Image: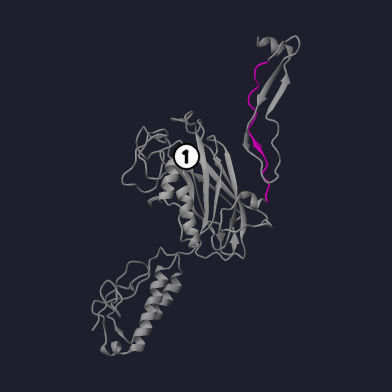
């Protein structure tokens, strides 16, 4: 004689604690589908189970009535056919409850083909926006190379509140990509990762880097990260952005990026010496209030939130490049060149002082610098220096 427990588990044919009580509401599944399946299981096993209706065990919005005195009949246990049907129904319910989560919009990506995107990372780490302890030398404020991966729901590059992988810890702490690349290749063997991308570092706190991405319906999510240099183990990035909405690819998404602590080093400032965190802690976001210590480089108690440290813009290109490479290897951006990137330069600086003799004619200069270098046959950069003759009055006034 076997009995259904109060917690809703059924010892059946050697199976241990198969959950049949409730389906968790956080799963991205249809409640109506779950309800229909539950009713089917209940009716299917009705000839074997005798339930008292005065007790209901519930831990979510969808529950089955359970009883402390539900027993299986002797005749039911003797029916091999009914045992097989009951086991099959319970296994279906278990798989339905514990299966992989669907896309963020509740639907798997059903787009008919791949989509090409261009990702542009822009750093906003300037002494004007972040004046506290702004690094100006050894090394000055800058960004590491950008690492991005396209993947499905079975893979996570990083996630707030969880421990960083060895590859993420190594990259966030030292900017080394060897372990991260090894983890990506292992995930690619399991078909959880589709492609791995990288860009060159940005040598200043305010600058751009870009790469092209090829998204596949079987790998519609994108994760990326960039290390803050210098820093103990701080980085910015995005976690599992889904670029597919049902049967359509999103046209453009933009994210403001804020700093995260990888949980491997307890340093408070950009240039803190090595101070390992043991044991490692979970990944946490750094805010204007946390860590709540005046020594922290991002501690601005008068601010409700930090301004964006960087932004990332992901824009779909008009068509897929004619030449494509296999996603089983690293994908180089130039293999998917399609949308041109024009050169972007800063505003002109102020005019300098007049140089040369006022009698024979003097000149003054002003300059600007490159924000984004051209790519994919984009417009070349204009002149970065300009000169103009000084008037005699201006020249004499500066002497």
- The colour scheme used here is one colour
Q: Quadrant of the N terminus?
A: bottom left
Q: Give the vertical position of 122 relative to 130 (above or below).
A: below
Corner quadrant of residue 373? top right
In the image, taking residue 111 as reference, residue 299 lies left or right, namely: left
Q: Predominant secondary structure in magenta? A: loop
Q: Which residue is drawn at 55% across and 46% down?
A: 312
The spot of residue 115 in percent (x, y) is: 62, 58
In the image, taking residue 388 as reference, residue 248 lies left or right, namely: left
Is 260 or 14 nearer to us in this picture? 14
Tell me which segment is drawn in magenta. 338-354
Which residue carries the number 1 mark?
A: 228
Q: Give the vertical position of 97 relative to 361 (above or below).
A: below
In the image, taking residue 397 as reference, residue 124 lies left or right, namely: left
The spot of residue 28 in percent (x, y) is: 45, 65
- 10 Å crowding of disc 1: few (<14), some (14-19), many (20+): many
Queried whether the magenta region covers residue 67, the answer comes back as: no
Q: Which residue is drawn at 37% across and 34% down?
A: 273
The spot of residue 38 in percent (x, y) is: 39, 76
Q: Residue at x 71, y 41 (%)?
A: 379
Corner quadrant of residue 87? bottom left
Q: Quadrant of the C terminus?
A: top right
Queried whether the magenta region covers residue 340, the answer comes back as: yes
Q: Give the vertical position of 206 relative to 73 (above or below).
A: above
The spot of residue 299 in percent (x, y) is: 40, 35
Residue 367, visible in the rendered structure:
yes
Q: Which residue is drawn at 70% across and 25% down?
A: 386
Residue 192, visible in the rendered structure:
no
Is 236 or 309 nearer to us in this picture? 236
């Amino acid at each position: 004689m076997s009995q259904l427990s109060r917690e809703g588990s059924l010892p059946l044919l050697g199976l241990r604690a198969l959950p049949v009580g409730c389906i968790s509401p956080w799963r991205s599944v249809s409640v109506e589908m779950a309800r229909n399946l539950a009713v089917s299981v209940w009716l299917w096993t009705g000839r074997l189970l005798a339930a008292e209706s005065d007790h209901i065990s519930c831990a979510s919005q969808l529950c089955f009535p359970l009883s402390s005195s539900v027993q299986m009949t002797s005749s039911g246990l003797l029916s091999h056919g009914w045992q097989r049907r009951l086991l099959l129904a319970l296994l279906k319910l278990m798989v339905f409850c514990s299966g992989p989560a669907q896309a963020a919009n509740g639907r798997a990506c059903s787009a008919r083909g791949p989509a090409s995107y261009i990702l542009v990372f822009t750093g906003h780490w300037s002494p004007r926006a972040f004046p506290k302890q702004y690094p100006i030398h050894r090394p000055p404020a800058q960004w590491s190379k950008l690492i991005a991966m396209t993947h499905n729901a079975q893979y996570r590059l990083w996630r707030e509140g969880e421990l960083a992988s060895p590859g993420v810890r190594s990259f966030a702490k030292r900017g080394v990509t060897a372990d991260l690349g090894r983890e990506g290749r292992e995930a690619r063997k399991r078909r959880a990762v589709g492609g791995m991308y990288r860009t060159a570092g940005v040598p200043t706190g305010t600058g751009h880097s870009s790469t092209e991405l090829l998204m596949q319906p079987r790998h519609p999510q994108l994760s990326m990260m960039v290390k803050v240099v210098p820093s103990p183990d701080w980085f910015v990035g995005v976690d599992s952005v889904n670029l597919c909405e049902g049967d359509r690819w999103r046209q453009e998404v933009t994210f403001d990026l804020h700093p995260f602590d990888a949980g491997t080093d307890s340093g408070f400032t950009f240039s803190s010496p090595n101070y390992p965190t043991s044991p490692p802690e979970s990944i946490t976001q750094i805010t204007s209030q946390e860590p709540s210590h005046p020594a922290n480089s991002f501690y601005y108690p008068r601010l409700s939130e930090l301004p964006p440290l960087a932004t990332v813009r992901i824009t779909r290109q008009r068509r897929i490049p004619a030449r494509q490479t296999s996603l089983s290897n690293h994908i180089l951006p130039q293999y998917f060149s399609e949308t041109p990137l024009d050169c972007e330069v800063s505003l002109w600086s102020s005019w300098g002082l007049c140089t040369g003799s006022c009698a024979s004619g003097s000149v003054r200069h002003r300059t600007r610098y490159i924000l984004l270098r051209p790519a994919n046959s984009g417009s070349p950069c204009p002149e970065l220096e300009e000169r103009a003759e000084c008037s005699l009055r201006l020249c004499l006034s500066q002497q």
